[in-house]
Amino acid sequence: MRIMVEYLDPEKRLRDAGIEDTLVFLGSARIEARENSEAALKALSVDASANDLRRANRAVEMSKYYVESRELTARLTVWAQELGDNGLGSSQHFSVVTGGGPGIMDAANRRAEEAGGTTISMNISLLFEQYPNEYISDGLAF
């Protein structure tokens, strides 16, 4: 029964959606969008500890990876759509797959959706991050 739930069902749903190939994005769930990390830094009070200030500055610095993930996803999504438009495959080639959580996964799913691509989540159960992000295509959160 478990093989049906964890393998056969996702395989069938991907096939039904016409998904042929995927691009897998892996990355930290802790990296936030630039605007969120900058807002958190700005919200620190003047009497914030040196450790809190250092952590907030580091979050702003690390947010560059969120930005870069979005840019790469946009380029790959447009490229995959051009393959389909040129008759070189279905429009579902090279759909974006992530773990479906926040951070880099959110960035990749978000930008692929904005670019008109299909996004897929292979979410896992963790104590604190069990929800898929909002940018996953309907029926493709596993």
Image (spheres, rainbow, N blue to C red):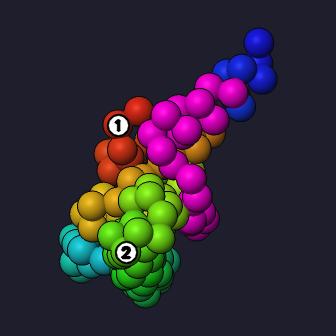
Q: Rate crowding at label 2 as few (under 14), some (14 to 19) or many (20 or more) other CA atoms within 10 Å.
A: few
The residue lying toward the viewer, choosing from 53 and 125, is: 125
Q: Is residue 71 left or right of residue 21?
A: left
Percent from the top left, x then y, of residue 39? Answer: 22, 72
Percent from the top left, x then y, of residue 66? Answer: 41, 75
Q: Is residue 137 left or right of residue 21?
A: left
Residue name at image x 33 percent, y 50 percent: 135
Percent from the top left, x then y, of residue 60? Answer: 38, 82
Name the residue at the front extreme: 87
Location of mark 2 (residue)? 86
Kindly tell me whether residue 4 is visible in this rendering.
Answer: yes
Residue range of the region highlighted in magenta in the rendering: 8-32
Residue name at image x 35 percent, y 37 percent: 138
The quadrant in which residue 107 appears is: bottom left
Cα separation between marks 1 and 2: 26 Å
Q: Is residue 122 left or right of residue 90?
A: right
The residue lying toward the viewer, choosing from 9 and 29, is: 9
**SS at mark 1?**
loop
Q: Is residue 3 magenta?
A: no
Percent from the top left, x then y, of residue 28? Answer: 56, 65
The quadrant in which residue 11 appears is: top right
Name the residue at the top extreme: 1
- Mark 1 or mark 2: name the one nearer the start of the chain: 2
Location of mark 1 (residue)? 138
Residue name at image x 77 percent, y 12 percent: 1
